[in-house]
Image: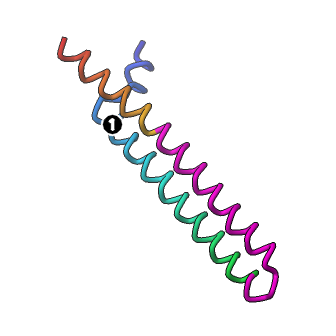
Amino acid sequence: MLAACVWAQSAGSDIGHGAASIGTGAAKGAGNLAKGAGMGALDLVTLHPIDAAASAGKGAVLAGKDVTVGTAKGTGKIGRGIGKAIKKLF
């Protein structure tokens, strides 16, 4: 029983971790988007237009995935924190 109390997080902690997950997902997405754009520009300069389009597309897809995963995880954590806060009120 004591271990369960040690590992339990407060509502504020859950909400904070949720916001951090959303921010992390957005940051990773921006990084992948920039990486794809950079690789695409490099491929375009070296006269590889097909590879340039593929690199830019891959960066955009990875960015979308990272933002989606971060948002989903963060929203779930925030929802859990709000649920805990409401539970404490009643």
Locate residue 89 relative to residue 9 in the image: left or right: left
Q: Within the image, what quadrant is residue 7 found in? A: top left
Q: Is residue 13 above or below residue 52?
A: above
Q: Which residue is mark 1?
A: 15
* Viewer-nearest residue: 59 or 78: 59
**Residue 49 colored magenta?**
yes
The residue at the point 39 percent across, 25 percent down is 8
Residue 86, image x and y in percent? 24, 19
Residue 25, image x and y in percent? 50, 51
* Viewer-nearest residue: 89 or 44: 44
Residue type (three-letter) at the residue carrying disc 1: Ile
Q: Is residue 23 above or below residue 34?
A: above
Locate the N terminus and report the quarter of the image it occupies: top left
The residue at the point 80 percent across, 73 percent down is 51
Q: Within the image, what quadrant is residue 21 found in? A: top left
The span shown in magenta is 44-73
Residue 16, image x and y in percent? 33, 42
- Please identify the dominant SS of the magenta region: helix
Q: What kind of element bears circle 1?
A: helix
* Viewer-nearest residue: 11 or 37: 37
* Viewer-nearest residue: 32 or 16: 32
Q: Few, some or many C-alpha atoms within 10 Å of disc 1 (few <14, some 14-19, many ≥20)? A: many
